[in-house]
Image (cartoon, rainbow, N blue to C red):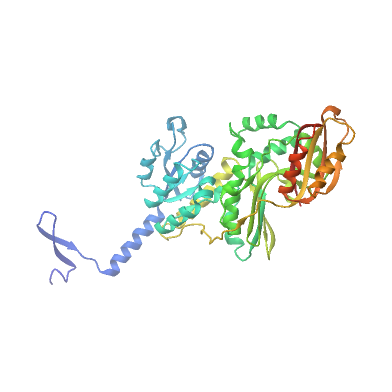
Amino acid sequence: MTAMQAGVRQTRSDSGAHGPELVLPARTAKAMARAQNAAELSSPCRIAVVGFGTVGSAVARLLQARRDRLFRLTDVCNRNVARKRVSSMSPDVIWTEDMQQVLDSDADVLVELMGGLEPAHKLVSEALRSGKAVVTANKQLIAHSGPELLQLARNQGRYLGFGACVAGGVPVLSGLQHGLAGDRLVQIRGILNGTCNFILSRIEEAGSSFADVLCEAQKAGFAEADPSFDVDGQDAGAKLAILARFGLKVNANPDQVVCQSIREISAVDFAYARELNCTIRQIALSHLRDSQIYLGVGPSLVSRLSSLSRVTGSQNLVVSTGEFGGETTFGGYGAGGDPTAVAVLSDLVQAANQRNKQLVGLDCPPVVDCELMTDFASPRYIRFVVRDRPGIIASLAAALAKHSLNIDAILQKPGYEKSALPFVMTLESCGQRALGAALREISKLEFLVEPPFAMPIVE
């Protein structure tokens, strides 16, 4: 039998000497490759976590609590990592401040929990290029760069999961894209920020001021030291842009969202809201009509009959409206470490199950460019605080009538000082542009103690 018949051929080594090389039959080589892939898939999926704050530490804790041995936490990366080290973690975990060390590691999946646009964008891009799957809870990153990163994941044949970016543990993105794929969605509205919902719920319950409840929320860990991103609407705005892209399939970005702060809400607004059988919530709304899209976030009066009114504390709720299927509601806890960590782990399960299958998680749907609708019509609530005197209602009615705005009702509760008397007008449905012009004129009237405060009424 010759050497070639035995499956051995002569080769030249690097030193120039000849030596034998085993040549396997094609069928045997394929079987060995399948066995190697099976061994890799049966081994634990190696996880590197970058960002070890509230969510990152919750993810690590949930990974440790799993009993299926699907995952193994291998790396934790954070600034000042010595302060973050947890003794309960496996001694094999590598703790580092060097993101490049994580990129060079043998981790299968990088979990990005830093937040912000940079260096998160660079880290996620390099991780995908290096052959790692990525799971992120970074709403700003996906809102601004989601399509680009999904395309990169597709080009690299890697998984990119971001279900935790919107509504924490509520699987709303997969529900909109896959569960409602047969419908044509025309509207998505909801409560997307747990911090604002906690603050508004507490003002309603305790009758406290915004400032006092904000301090309470900060002490309880529901609000950041600088709460602007939450209370001024940018956090919900980023989530709304993601929902509009994946649900309504329009080319939306956070810069297009009209945001109004909840800072001006007071206990008196809730008192008048009760008179109208309503409550107040921060509502995010995306509405598609023909080739126009409206994107807005801000405080709104919500009917007590609406499911949105029953969302309290740090819960989130998303209501989609389809052209054929009507309303579908997604609800659950959207803030806090554990609910968000559950969403991260759900994506990690997908990443682990889809190793070597060339799948990239949620698809980036084909989107269309729409004209931005900045003037959305709805009934309005306006709170005035005045130095009481005869003729105030007539002056306000005249200013509103000048801009073709019709008064629906006037409410005045007793018991307030005449020097700073709060009362409310509700208007029939009108656009923001006409209302804004009328309120600018009204703000010049000398009997006003403070500028009028207006918000939409959600029907």
Query: Can you see residue 327?
Result: yes
Toward the right, the furthest residue is 390
Seen in the picture, residue 132 relative to 322 is either above or below; the reply is above
Q: Quadrant of residue 209?
A: top right
Toward the left, the furthest residue is 17
Which quarter of the rendered picture does the N terminus lie within?
bottom left
Q: Quadrant of residue 29?
A: bottom left
Q: Quadrant of residue 157?
A: bottom left
Q: Is residue 43 left or right of residue 291?
A: left
Q: Is residue 14 left or right of residue 111?
A: left
Q: Nearer the viewer, residue 335 or 272?
A: 272
Number of numbered discs visible in the structure rendering:
0
Residue 129: x and y, percent?
38, 52
Seen in the picture, residue 314 relative to 429 is either above or below; the reply is above
Residue shown at 90% from the left, 34% from the top = 390
Residue 69: x and y, percent?
45, 49
Q: Nearer the viewer, residue 122 or 54?
A: 122
Query: Can you see residue 168?
Result: no
Q: Nearer the viewer, residue 303 or 444?
A: 444
Q: Is residue 118 left or right of residue 400?
A: left
Residue 61: x and y, percent?
51, 40
Q: Nearer the viewer, residue 410 or 84?
A: 410
Residue 142: x and y, percent?
52, 49
